[in-house]
Image (tube, rainbow, N blue to C red):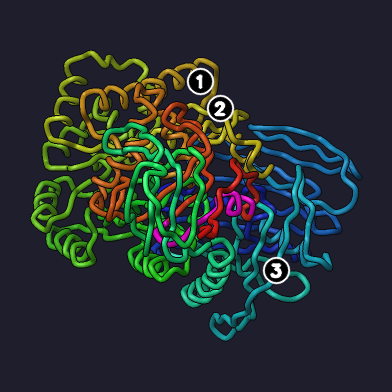
Amino acid sequence: MNPRMNPGRNVWASLCLGAGLGLVSIAASAAETIRYVALVDGGTQAGQQVVTHRDDGVTEVEFIFKDNGRGPELQERFTLADDGTFQTYQVSGSSTFGAPVEESFSRDGDRVEWKSTSDEGEKTISGTAQYVPLGGTPAGFSVAVGALSKRPDHTLPLIPGGTLTMRKIAEAQVSHGDETRTVQLVTLTGIGLVPTFAWATTGDDPRLFAYIYPGYLQLIEDGWQANADALEAQQKQAEGEALVALQQDLTHPVSGRLLIRDARVFDSENATLGGASDVLVENGRIVSVTVAGAEAVDADQVVDAAGRVLLPGLFDSHVHVGRWDGGLHLATGITTVRDMGNDNATLQQLMAQIEAGELLSPRVVAAGFIEGESKFSARNGFVVDTMDEAREAVDWYAAHDYPQVKIYNSFPKELLRETVAYAHEKGLRVSGHVPAFMRADEVVEQGFDELQHINQILLNFFVTPDTDTRTLARFYLVADETAGLDFDSPRVQDFIDLLVREKVVVDPTLATFEFLHQRAGEMSPIVADVADHLPPDIQRNRRAAEMDIPDDATAALYDRSFAKLVEFVGLMHEAGVPIIAGTDEMPGFTLQRELELYVQAGMTPGEALQTATWNAAAASRVREDRGSIEVGKRADLILVDGEPTANISDIRKVALVLKGDTAYYPSEIHAALGIEPFAQPVRLGAAGR
């Protein structure tokens, strides 16, 4: 997932998920101030961190990061024990989407206690242990690095639970004027689902020097920015080697002809479940689909489906591809993702690595990102200010075989109609957000083929010509106003009729917007039903609120508004608007929740599955290649140990995934990521001849 689109849920979540993960020097004993800058898009400053180490032992941190019209603002204060871990800690401020942050921790001997807006606790701890804040700045990283360096095994017990481990994997020389330093690339594991890579100083008291999210963010000590690109390139190589090893450990090549025997095949075109069938696969393609046992089939390998449901591989139609996301996608049966905005060079490299079989990843369909110039600009893809620049962007995406472009929030509205027409002339579909100071009905009338996000659609009824939807207003307006919207009113019905008439596809990402009504201390609905399968730190993090919901009355209002967002998707579906399942959130699990919400909206389970197969393949322009189980199509298939066409929640019980000529066992992938599996694997077996 590209953190550009959702920084509160990925970059800062990974850094501060407990916050032994932050980025400051704590080694100095005398008063000292250290500044860090946060750069996006190879040099645009989007934030800073100022760390003051007072000579009384107190460290104070001021942190701000603003990108894409949102981001956290935090003030932190802490002291350290002799072993380098937090003795006292407190942080306050606001989260990415405006929720209040207020958290504290203290240790007195073996007793520790903590309190945040989402949880509180106390326990007895013996020996060294590091508290992991929910809402911390990136300043805790150096605390963790420093404490880990003091321990011979480089492991650190965590509070409330878990263990953090650090491993050095590379070194580099960096320069600033006449000064030269040696820095080390380390990986930290034990928080989150994948390793965290970071650059630290060397010596007796190491601290974090830079944190880099390749293709998006460079957070580095001020003055040393010129070294960031070289560090990013070296880090990408090291990450690539780790990812290749992961891919090799978790893939199972299909040899020769594979027979999937006695599977009930889902007909994605008609959203129905068929009878028992035998499906023959060879060279990554479906060779035949016949009635189970009707004829003898010569095969080299066999999968005994034993009456389980066989589905086409699922699509997630709204992601921002990250190098470490593939395992979560594949383990939940997602074999194709549609990237809806990324750094172009990074995405091209990722797609080449996926094609070469170097990354554990679904197939990628790319949407070209086009943004307009403003202080709110999301700067991946192309940022344009003139029609010539817009044409150049469209031409680049057409030349690189992108099937569509995505228009973003700051795109100049005076260029929109001509840009859409030019993209259509080049054979590209056009989708996107609704640019600021416009309404959804206007962009549809100007030729949009697809709309992203349920909030962008409902804002149609709430914005005025002066409403700047590049700010947090695009979330709070929907939360405040949707509950009172009359869906039977002419303006709502006329809008739905417009979508139907213009054959507009909608990618609502409903599950993503559950944060609109999630209160502090409540488990995110995305993972509520599976939380006990997830690592404890993920469970704790997913209880943190993202919106400012100050009282019960506001909470009730936001609950009603979200319920009406779900209802609106049902109304569009019933009217004939094609819905496609996308997420823009936590890989894998969010798509499962998205499909559950579609059933709540009034779809049958089969129709919900259709949004992630048949409909999605059409919107991605790959229906001739995948999206259904038919002879000649790719063998992108998933075997489910349940009845998802009767109970959509059974989509979590994926027992086997085929992506062409490669098999994956979801239980193996989940176990490698620290997740308790959901189904026993159905394995490839040798054919008995």
Q: Nearer the viewer, residue 51 or 414?
A: 414
Q: Is residue 451 left or right of residue 135?
A: left
Stretch of the chain drawn in magenta: 659-671
The residue that label 1 is drawn on is 555
Q: Is residue 540 left or right of residue 418?
A: right
Circle number at residue 60:
none
Q: Within 10 angstroms of label 1, few (less than 14), some, or many (20 or more) residues?
A: some
Q: Is residue 106 above or below residue 186?
A: above
In the drawing, does residue 510 fall left or right of residue 519?
Answer: left
Element type at mark 2? loop
| Mark before the other along the chain sequence, 3 or 2 | 3
Q: Are marks 2 and 1 in contact (CB under 8 Å)?
A: yes
The amino acid marked with disc number 3 is Arg
Give the image quarter of residue 509.
top left
Label 2 sits on residue:
519
Residue 167, labelled with which disc? 3
